[in-house]
Amino acid sequence: MAGKLNCVIVSVDGSEESMNALNWTLDNIKLKPHDPDSQESQGSIVILHVQSPPSIAAGLNPGAIPFGGPSDIEVPAFTAAIEAHQKRITQAILDHALEICANKNANVKTQVVIGDPKEKICDAVEEMNADLLVMGSRAFGPIKRMFLGSVSNYCTNHAQCPVIIVKATP
């Protein structure tokens, strides 16, 4: 691709498909070069990871307190444990992505946001004024996509940015 892209976001979730998308981006996308005669900076690749909020993480909830206690209170130790676990997972995902980038001598930025992936990815695209969003394919068929949804479809409809879906190589 032509070297006129200023900001390319690669969404990673730790899956093999998302890491394939990162590899594909590093191999195929050419960013805008630094122009010493202007104030414009060189284009950048941003590795974006969306972390679920602790209350949603893996559907975990400590549940109601037995014998009629309140059921809608948060247990701080439980929430803190989930947050710490999620931070470790996020760091492992970013470390893996940065290792891929280091092996290709690529200089990238990272960003972590917390929330619903489809909304937060699209928000990041808009906030960073991204020229391109690259994601790995989860290979959902039409029925699964109808029930589970597709982040790429959502972002194509909500963000003003082209989306490239990188399919796994056989």
Image (tube, rainbow, N blue to C red):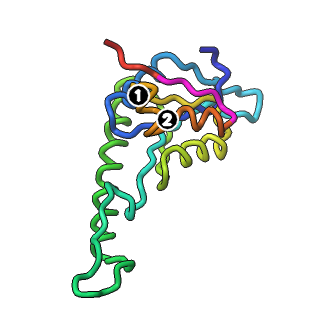
At 60% from the left and 29% from the top, the residue drawn is 132
Q: Position of residue 159 (x, y in %)?
A: 66, 38
Q: Amino acid at mark 2?
A: Ser
The quarter of the picture where the N terminus appears is: top right
Residues under numbered marks 2 and 1 in contact, where contact means CB atoms less than 8 Å apart: yes
Location of residue 3 by image quarter: top right
Location of residue 69 by image quarter: bottom left
**Which residue occupies the extreme left position in the image?**
66
| SS assignment at label 2 | loop
Q: Position of residue 120 (x, y in %)?
A: 54, 48
| SS assignment at label 1 | loop
Left or right of 68? Residue 123 is: right
Above or below, 96 against 119 in this view is: above
Find the magenta span and give its range: 160-165
- Residue 162 painted magenta: yes
Quick check: can you spot residue 1? yes
Which residue, given by chain and number where applicable, does mark 2 sit on? 150
At 65% from the left and 39% from the top, the residue drawn is 158
Q: Position of residue 8 (x, y in %)?
A: 57, 31
Q: Amino acid at mark 1?
A: Phe
| In-front residue for pair 59/24 | 59
The mark nearer the N terminus, 2 or 1, is 1
Which residue, given by chain and number where applicable, does mark 1 sit on? 140
